[in-house]
């Protein structure tokens, strides 16, 4: 099962109604069993409803359609964003969701929308930090994870999204102080990976982090990486920027545990993302993913 997070940059009616952009986004989303879109600017929900309709009308998705789970608009000021999950309903279903609310100190600009899925009690926590506050916001996520463990009775937790965790926003010295940069957390995206489609930088802003060794063992080796859709779909710089200034970051979870000395998630050497097919694998039978067997209880 392939999971991804994608900062689509101002994803609202204009993009959902643009045929070229929508077509490319459908191709990208269709690669995944489960993907969370960040920076969704759609207060009414009409844009995402339109996109979901078009996504499921695509030939490759008619037999295996997607459902959607959306947060409320989030943010401190007038600019509000949503976290929106799209997932193939024959592979996985959202069981329960809740909005994290900070009780006292306002540390998180966009408080995480926590969603629990049927696949072995998997909990996803999407993140989009404010660039200048990346260190503070990322450290605050440790409390979000601890609460999710208790509320959902699971350790199968993945944090994913636009961390702004590189460059001047989060240099190495500051990163070392971030609570979720320490065990039992595991950062899967290679530090040298370029998750931006901009030619002006090659930063690793977007990340995937898993909690604990059981989740790490469930990660397919070499699978955690950005998907360079510009190269895969042979797009010009101009057309690429119309889609987003970020690439999706993705990871694959294995069906069967196996002994391996290869590093989990991080590629041992650079791969050309274009070699991956945009057509989903066989979806008829939901596999038994190799997570820890834990109590299934509603969040």
Image (cartoon, rainbow, N blue to C red):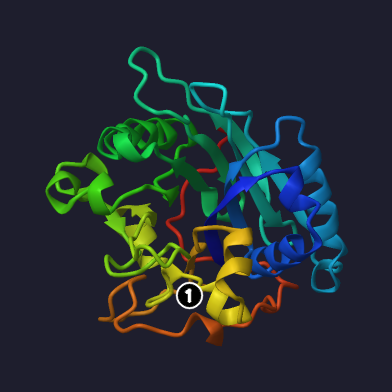
Q: Secondary structure at mark 1?
A: loop
Q: Is residue 35 above or below residue 74?
A: below
Q: Is residue 222 visible?
A: yes
Left or right for 234, reference 76? right
Counting from the top left corner in percent of width and height, residue 189 is at: 35, 64
Residue closer to the observer: 229 or 140:
229
Q: How many marks?
A: 1
Residue located at (51% from left, 71% from top): 227
Q: Which residue is mark 1?
A: 256
Residue located at (27% from left, 65% from top): 191
Counting from the top left corner in percent of width and height, residue 202 is at: 34, 66
Q: Is residue 94 above or below residue 42?
A: below
Residue closer to the observer: 176 or 63:
176
- In this view, the residue farthest toward the left is 173
Residue closer to the observer: 266 or 284:
266
The image quadrant where one finds the C terminus is top right
Q: Is residue 157 visible?
A: no
Counting from the top left corner in percent of width and height, residue 96 is at: 62, 36
Residue located at (58% from left, 29% from top): 80
The image quadrant where one finds the N terminus is bottom right
Near mark 1 (Cα within 10 A), the count class, few <14, some 14-19 or many ≥20, is few
Left or right for 237, reference 107? right
Left or right for 170, reference 232? left
- In this view, the residue farthest toward the top is 104
């Amino acid at each position: 099962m392939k999971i991804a997070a994608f900062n689509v940059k101002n994803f609202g009616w204009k993009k959902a109604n643009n045929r070229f952009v929508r077509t490319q986004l459908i191709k990208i989303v269709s690669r995944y069993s489960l993907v969370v879109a960040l920076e969704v600017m759609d207060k009414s929900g009409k844009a995402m409803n339109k996109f979901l309709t078009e996504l499921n009308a695509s030939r490759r998705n008619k037999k295996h359609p997607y459902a959607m789970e959306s947060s409320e608009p989030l943010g401190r000021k007038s600019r509000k964003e949503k976290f929106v999950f799209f997932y193939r309903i024959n592979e996985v279903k959202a069981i329960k969701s809740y909005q994290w609310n900070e009780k006292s100190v306002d540390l998180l600009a966009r408080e995480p929308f926590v969603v629990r899925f049927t696949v072995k009690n998997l909990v996803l926590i999407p993140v989009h930090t404010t660039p200048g506050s990346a260190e503070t916001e990322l450290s605050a996520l440790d409390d979000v994870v601890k609460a999710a463990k208790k509320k959902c009775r699971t350790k199968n937790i993945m944090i994913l999204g636009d961390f702004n965790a590189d460059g001047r926003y989060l240099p190495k010295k500051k990163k070392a102080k971030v609570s979720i940069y320490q065990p039992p957390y595991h950062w899967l995206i290679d530090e040298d990976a370029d998750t931006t489609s901009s030619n002006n930088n090659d930063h690793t802003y977007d990340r995937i982090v898993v909690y604990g060794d059981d989740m790490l063992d469930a990660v397919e080796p070499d699978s955690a990486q950005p998907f360079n859709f510009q190269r895969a779909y042979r797009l010009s710089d101009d057309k690429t920027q119309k889609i987003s200034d970020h690439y999706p970051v993705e990871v694959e979870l294995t069906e069967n545990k196996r002994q391996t000395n290869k590093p989990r998630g991080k590629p041992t050497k650079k791969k050309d993302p274009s070699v991956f097919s945009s057509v989903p694998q066989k979806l008829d039978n939901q596999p038994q993913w190799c997570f820890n067997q834990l109590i299934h209880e509603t969040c």
